[in-house]
Image (cartoon, rainbow, N blue to C red):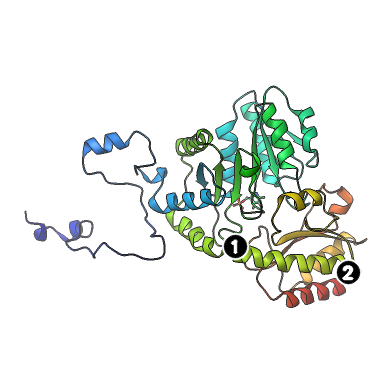
Amino acid sequence: MGKDRRELETRLIHPLKRAPQRFDSLAVPVERASTVLFDSLAEALETGRESDEHYRYGVNGTPTTRELELRIGEIENAAGCTLAPSGLAAIALTYLATCKAGDHVLIPASVYFPNVRIGRWLKNLDIEVETYDPMLGAQIADLLRPNTRLVWCESPGSISMEVQDVPAIVEAAHANKTIVAVDNTYAAGLLFNPLDHGADLSIHALTKYPGGHSDVLMGAVNARDERLALKLRDTARLLGICVSSDDAALVLRGLPTMKLRIDHVGKAALGIARWLDGHDAVETVLHPALPACPGHATFERDFSGSAGVFSVIFKDWPRDKVARFVDGLELFKIGYSWGGVASLAMAYDRLVRPSREEGDRLVRLNIGLENVEDLKADLDRAISNA
Ligand SMILES: *Cc1c(COP(=O)(O)O)cnc(C)c1O
C-alpha cells in the first residue's frame, strides 16, 4: 500500500508532509516527549546504558531540560546540575540522594520551613534530622557525629535572614567527611557561590529569580564534583523526578534577564530597607546589608550584593495592627514566594524566630520592579493607616 493511500486516521499520526526542519531561533526549542525514537533496535538497547550523550525516554531529559541544566550548572561552575519539579522537590531529592537509614543530618533553625517538615518525615526512614543555631559557624563541629552525613545551610535564612559562615561550616563538616548542601535560592548563584567556598551541593528554587515571573515552579541541585552530580542525576531518574520542557522553557526565558532583575531589585530593596530603618514605626530591618542583620559581617565578606527580599520588625505593634498594615497595602500583594516582578508582603503565624515575640511583628517584603517611590508611598500610607 502506497503512503498516500493510507487512511486519514493513520495520516493524522504519520503525515505525508513535514515542514522544513532547519530553524535557527534564538529561543531554545521546546521539545516535548515521553517516547524518544531510535534508528534501530541495536541503538535502542545500547542507549539503554545510561549516558548524557543520548536521549532515551522523557524522564531522562529532553534537549530543552538538558539545556537548562547546563545553563544553571554554568552559573556556579558545577560539575553537574539536576532539575526537580519545585525547589521543595530539589530539597527532598538532595536528602534521598545523600542519606541512608541510620544517618544524622543538621539543618539550621532558620531554614525554609518545609525543609524542617521533610526532616520530620525522614524519621520514617530512620534518618535523624536535628536543628542547629544558624550563627554557630565553626562551632558546628561540636554537633557533628560519626554518622552525620549531611549539613544544610541556607544563607541568608528564610524570613529571619541570618547570614551563615558557610566556609567555616564547610571546613568543620569536611573534617568529619560530612557533605554540605546550601540552599542558595536567595543569591541565585549570582551574589554568592557556595561551591566556590567548598560546599558540595547548591540547591535552588528556580521558581524565584531564574523563573522570575511567578508563573512556574522548578528546582535544581548543582554539585561541585562529578561523583555527587551523578548520584543526584541517577537518584532523580530512579525516582521519576523530572520536569516538563514547557516549564523548562519558561525558566530559560527568565535567565537572560536574571542578573539585570537582581541588580535592580537589590538596589531598590536596599534603598527601601534603609528608608524603613529610619521610620518611626520600625524597630529593626533584617536586611543582610544592614548592620542589625545577624551575620552582616559575613555577608560583607562573602557576598557581592543583596537581593530583593528582606524583613521588617515593627515597634510595639500588636498582631492585628500588623494585619491591618499588610491588608492596607495596595501595590504590595499578599502571597507566598518571591523573586517575581510584583512586590509582595507576608506576615507569619507562630514564627518562633528571631524570637517568638518579635516574630508576631515581622513582615517579609519582596521588592519587585515597580517604581521605588511608589512602593515607599504605599508602605508609608499603609503604616499610617494601620
Ligand atoms: C521558595 C523556596 C524554596 C522552595 O521552592 P519552590 O519552588 O517554591 O518549592 C526553597 N528554598 C527557599 C529558600 C525558598 O525561598
Q: Is there any visible trace of residue 3 in the rendered image?
A: yes
Q: Is there any visible trace of residue 350 in the rendered image?
A: no
Q: Secondary structure at mark 2?
A: loop
Is the residue marked by circle 2 packed among few (<14), some (14-19), or many (20+) residues within 10 Å? some
**Would you say the beta carbon of the disc 2 residue lies within 8 angstroms of ligand 1?**
no
Q: What residue type is disc 1 on?
A: Lys
Which numbered mark, 2 or 1, is in the foreground of this view? Answer: 1
Q: Could you tell me if the residues under marks 2 and 1 are in contact, i.e. CB atoms within 8 Å?
A: no
Q: Residue 283's quadrant in the figure? A: bottom right
The residue positioned 76% from the left and 29% from the top of the image is 141
Q: Is residue 317 left or right of residue 242?
A: right
Q: Residue 310's quadrant in the figure? A: bottom right
Q: Residue 277: percent from the left, percent from the top? A: 86, 65
Q: What residue type is disc 2 on?
A: His
**In the picture shown, does residue 77 fall above or below 328?**
above
**Would you say the beta carbon of the disc 1 residue lies within 8 angstroms of ligand 1?**
no
- Asked whether 119 or 190 is in front, the reply is 190
Q: Secondary structure at mark 1?
A: helix
Q: Residue 117: percent from the left, percent from the top? A: 68, 40
Q: Is residue 191 left or right of residue 140?
A: left
**In the picture shown, does residue 161 fall above or below 233?**
below
**In the picture shown, does residue 130 fall above or below 346?**
above
Residue assigned mark 2: 279
The residue positioned 76% from the left and 48% from the top of the image is 163
Q: Residue 314's quadrant in the figure? A: bottom right
State the CA–CA distance, disc 2 to disc 1.
30 Å
Q: Residue 63: percent from the left, percent from the top? A: 38, 51
The residue positioned 41% from the left and 64% from the top of the image is 27
**In the picture shown, does residue 382 fall above or below 157?**
below
Q: Residue furthest left?
A: 1
Residue assigned mark 1: 259
